Amino acid sequence: MKNSSLLIVLSLFLNLPLQAQTVFGKWENRNEKGRVNSIVEVYEQDNEVYGRVTRIMREEDRDRVCTKCEGDLRNEPIEGMVIMQGLTKSGDEFAGGTIVDPKSGKEYRCKIWLDEENPDILKVRGYISFFYQTREWSRAE
């Protein structure tokens, strides 16, 4: 009986690192000064990856709407907004989707992947033509 209980406990602890090594979950989006602006939850739906702003950190900004966004996102609340959509698995990364910057309203092609050395860092890259910018999001606790 003791051996089976020990095996169960050990298997739970051994699975923790494996579960942490996924793009899915909540991520801290930081500004250039290192301050957390928002929490984005990355999730899977219908075999595609999406990202939703679940929390804006500054209370006075929580009611802001995306005045510069186009289409269905125009004048929608940023908190709760799906800013990343349509990514599919491609090797060790997810690509082929888009991401919207609610500040500028611009939409970019997007891909995401975990940092090879630290799985608690998500690399988020937005593209326009050959130009791109990569941001690092930290896993939220």
Image (cartoon, helix red, strand yellow):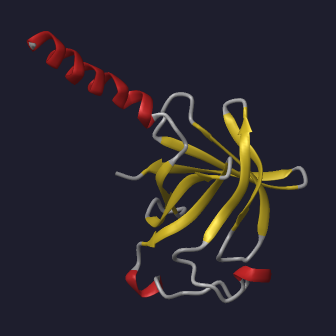
Residue 85's quadrant in the figure? bottom right
Q: Which residue appears at 40% of the width and 53% of the height?
A: 140
User: Residue 60 at x, y = what percent?
Assistant: 42, 87
Of all residues, the one furthest to the top in this rendering is 3
Of all residues, the one furthest to the right in this rendering is 129
Quadrant (top left/top right/bottom left/bottom right) for the N terminus? top left
Could you tell me if residue 70 is visible in this image? no
User: Residue 118 at x, y = what percent?
Assistant: 48, 33
The answer to whether residue 133 is left or right of residue 55 is right
Q: Which residue appears at 28% of the width and 27% of the height?
A: 12
Can you say whether 88 is above or below 84 in the image? above
Can you say whether 33 is above or below 110 in the image? below
The front one of 5 and 125 is 5
Q: Which residue appears at 43% of the width and 34% of the height?
A: 19
Can you say whether 18 is above or below 58 in the image? above
User: Residue 112 at x, y = what percent?
Assistant: 66, 45
Can you say whether 113 is above or below 52 in the image? above
Residue 108's quadrant in the figure? bottom right
User: Residue 55 at x, y = what percent?
Assistant: 44, 71
The front one of 24 and 2 is 2
